Image (tube, rainbow, N blue to C red):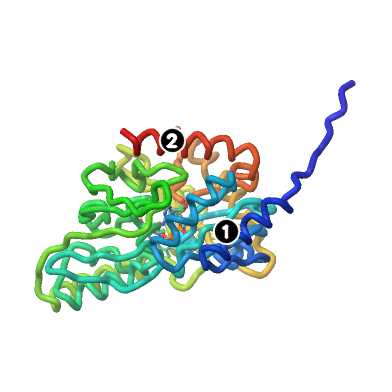
Amino acid sequence: MATKVETKPDFAKRDALIEEIASRLGVRAERGRRFAELTSLRVGGAIDWVISPETETAAAELVYELEKANIAWRALGSGSNVLADDREHHYVILSLRDLKGEARFDGERVSISAGYSLPRLCVDAARQGLSGIEGLGGIPGTVGGALWMNAGAYGHEIGTVTESVRVARQGRVVEVPGSEVEWNYRHTSFREGELLLGATLRLHRDEPEKIKARMEEAKQKRLATQPHGARSAGCFFKNPPGSKVGTGKMIDEMGMKGTRRGGALVSPIHANFIVTEGEDAKASDALALAEEIRERVRREHGIELEYEVELWSAEENNSLESLERKENLVDSLDSKESE
Ligand SMILES: Cc1cc2nc3c(=O)[nH]c(=O)nc-3n(C[C@H](O)[C@H](O)[C@H](O)COP(=O)(O)OP(=O)(O)OC[C@H]3O[C@@H](n4cnc5c(N)ncnc54)[C@H](O)[C@@H]3O)c2cc1C
């Protein structure tokens, strides 16, 4: 009988490379962080490295260096749409939280970096008398996270007003027209391995008081229908395409509000929100509850619910096997660039 030999990858060489790259580019690199500190669900395991560039140029150089060194990475904004599992995640988290800069207004346009807070941007735009994103004011993430999944609420979606997106390509900041991006329902054509650095939005003029009133209206609706101050990631599942009934209503009608698995429960206020409670809450609790919901919806409605929240598995991007994929991606970007 063949014996399976478990080999633990030796990360010492990789760690030395990360330290060298971070120090050469002058970016902060930390160890000992956990997803439980960096995501709004407040669960999830240890992360090998968190690197936090402060400028778009440094971020573009950083991912290029990581890719050349075959080091797996993932971008993280405010972590308000991510459920990372409880295991050790052996890849680099490229945190965009420090990549904030200032919002630069020019007529009806505003340019912001990926780490800029979306709620703050909505307030800034309203003050300038610029309309088009006031429905997004209650989405607790960064501009980069919103662009990545085409965040939307109350009649507004970020993709609709995005004139261009700045992305990292071969160590440089490259501007991609918004019209070349596919903006779908909570999904875009951006691919894993692409780092979004910032964007220019094109808004339109309206009276600041009217914009503020619409923002206030959206806020009140949110407060009336969603748990406030709870540890959640917003809606857990997308609404099924073509279904007349929204996912929240469907889960509510199955009587699942308040259902608890360990430290996770279906919010008693909004059934499409899974919230976590207590110090012992685990990502596995939230995932078990989510899978139970999916199973019941499948059985009782014949519908396959799709996750809106991103599930991050420690295995998926776990260094070695993903490096090959990243290498292919760099190759394909290289050939695209030289076209
Ligand atoms: C209470 C609450 C209410 C919410 N309401 C809404 C809502 O009404 N509408 C809605 O659309 N969403 C909603 N959300 C979900 C979430 O806030 C949005 O998806 C938000 O846009 C995520 O931004 P983030 O910075 O937190 O992204 P993260 O959660 O950090 O990341 C999400 C994904 O984007 C990728 N990403 C982030 N930044 C970058 C970057 N710069 N480059 C490349 N990839 C990147 C990450 O790798 C990840 O795949 C809600 C969440 C909560 C907690």
- The residue at the far right in this view is 1
What residue do we see at 21% from left, 45% from top?
Answer: 179
Give the quadrant of the N terminus.
top right
Towards the viewer: 309 or 62: 62
134 with respect to 38 (left or right): left
Q: Residues within 10 Å of mark 2 (few under 14, many from 20)?
A: some
219 with respect to 1 (left or right): left
Q: Residues within 10 Å of mark 1 (few under 14, many from 20)?
A: some
What residue do we see at 20% from left, 54% from top?
Answer: 163
Towards the viewer: 274 or 99: 99
Amino acid type at mark 2: Ile
Residue 111 at what x, y percent from top left? 25, 65
Name the element at disc 2. loop
| Label 2 – label 1 distance at C-alpha | 47 Å
Residue matched to label 2: 303
What residue do we see at 23% from left, 57% from top?
Answer: 156
- The residue at the far front in this view is 24
Please indicate, yes or no, whether residue 171 appears anywhere in the rendered image: yes
Residue 139 location, quadrant: bottom left
Residue 216 at what x, y percent from top left? 25, 74
Residue matched to label 1: 21
